[in-house]
Image (cartoon, coloured by chain):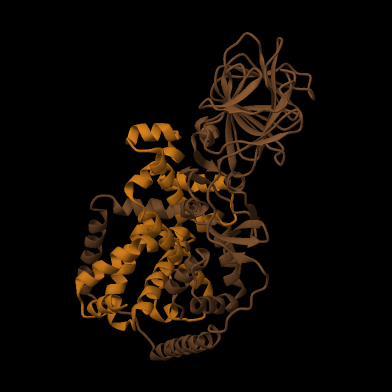
Amino acid sequence: MDERKNYFDRLQKGDEAALDYYIKNNIQTLTFFAYKHVRDEQLSEEIACDSFVKLWHNRHLLKNELHLQNFLFRVTRNACLNYLDKQKNKPVLDYDLESLTIADDNDINRKIIYAEFLKLIYDELEKLPKQQALIFKMSFLDGYSTEEICDILKTSKNNVFYAKSKAQATLRLLLKKKKFELYSVLLLAYFYHP
Amino acid sequence: MLDTQLIAFLIKKYLHNELTTEESLLFREWLNADAENVKLLSELETADKVFTDLSIYNRIAERQKEGTKLTALTEKIKERTRQDEKQPKPIRARSKRALNWIKYAAAILILFSSIYVYIKQTSDVPYPSENHSTHFSDIAPGTNRAILKLPNGKTIDLDNDADGIIADNTTISYADGRKIEIANSSAPQNAIVTLEVPLRGQYHVTLSDGTKVWVNAGSKLHYPLHFEGNQRAVELEGEAYFEVSTDEIPFIVKSKNQTLKVLGTKFNISAYDERKEIITTLVEGKVALGSENIQEAPLVLTPGQQSIFNGKRFSKTKVDVEQFIAWKNGQFYFDGVSPEEAFSQLAKWYDIDIVYEGTTPKFEFFGIIDRGKNLSGVLDILKKSGLNFKLEAQGTHRKLIIQDEQTY
């Protein structure tokens, strides 16, 4: 918390390193959040970048870290809605801070919570050791058998099984009400980088 | 205003079953505030949407992590802030809103401290015990043990240390050569004896033709002291691994209503009573499977194939045979087996009842585990898959309770 407070203070004082920190920690989630509205990766990234520009210009007006997070998501959402309206030849709404601080907008809150939740899960997958990630990829995407993985990676069967178990524990929350097939689907999706 | 990061964090902990009591109350508070929140949670739990979105999230994240992409984006943002600095256009803010926010924060703080006091007062009260079961911490693994039932009704407790028994015409001896006394030596040579292996046991027997059989826990093998005439036939209840010595006389294994016929080969049959299917796995050679219940031509297995017979129909698949014969090499071998399968193996080897608290967990086990381990050692490994266990004894019954995730 102290660290977060520290960065918040530095941002307000105009320290660009603090901006780096917020970009690094939020840009993925914001881009995802924008993508859910506009369905275009390139555009989502543009919008997310713009949100940080807006953050920088309005940094003096932010009360605290919490306010900052909400600000980022809300300007992103508004930019997306503006874009979608533009597509429909509707007049462009200008974003302003007033519309951004309305507290009873529970719907957007839930969308933000959802995006933040995905970030937490993704971060957890990222924490898996490289070897483990590789083993999942080989077994679930490339369809290698346990023996083949052992041969290629020069590792023991127990290591392969251990890696699969660890991933399963990590993803366990997603398996609560699902059959295992879906778990495989997730791994496929997770390791598929077009 | 709501701390969305905190709520996301609480949801994650809730799904992982890691909420502290304080957090749990806060989480409930949020959940009860709006029916839509409950809907969001159930969406996360059913996972469909999460799967799709996680893959999108991953794609975006991977894109931005590539090489110097993040640095480039950061530079782009900073470049824009500098351009815009020349004509700044800050957004107007109203202080009234800020006041609102402080009220929220204060409310949360008060909530937090009152929850804390509440818990402090209640958590010291011990819970009354609801049943008379006692906890116990461990069970030693199964060993080599079995009894031999002779045609005259006599039973012999077989030596635990011996490396199996060998049938040799009219006599039976241990592998090290010690003779086993069979009182009634007038029994006909083709008299059937039964090797009965209890739960927490396994045993190895060499038949009169040299065929080797490893009999698993909770199983019976009926076989003649000596094979006579033009048939070698045994009957199996439960599970056993066979290395049939090559001979022109076919070797027949009957299990329930399945009949397996071979000349010489290695295979495993699992035909426990409580299971509907008979599973036959071929390691070497060739076997033919049939049943009195069906008229079709026998099903032929080649090495690496497995047949599953449900009493009416045979089906054939290709498998990694090692996992089906690992037990005779002293291993549990789980390569993606269901909890039911894994636990039924533990139930036999440790002589325990399996109880599911709540629903049967839906996921798979992976691991090769030494069968010489105590139960606790095995459970420690299975815990890596994210399950929790409790051991309880009621009278002579020992139960392994598989605990469900926290249900809300």
**Residue pictured at 34% horizontal, 33% vertical:** A152
- Percent of width and height locating residue B362: 59, 51
Q: Count the marks: how many?
A: 0
> Camera-side residue: A71 or B133?
B133
- Percent of width and height locating residue B197: 64, 38
> In which quarter of the view is residue B236 placed?
top right
The brown one among the chains is B
> In which quarter of the view is residue A95 placed?
bottom left
Is residue B51 depicted above or below B15 in this figure? Answer: above
- Percent of width and height locating residue B220: 68, 34
The orange one among the chains is A
Is residue B248 depicted above or below A134 in this figure? Answer: above
Screen quadrant of the C terminus of chain B? bottom right
Q: Is residue A95 visible?
A: no
> Camera-side residue: B226 or A9?
B226
- Percent of width and height locating residue B255: 71, 28
Left-right relation of B127 to A88: right
Q: Is residue B377 visible?
A: yes
**Residue pictured at 39% horizontal, 71% vertical:** A75
**Residue pictured at 26% horizontal, 53% vertical:** B69
> Camera-side residue: A120 or A11?
A120
**Residue pictured at 54% horizontal, 30% vertical:** B319
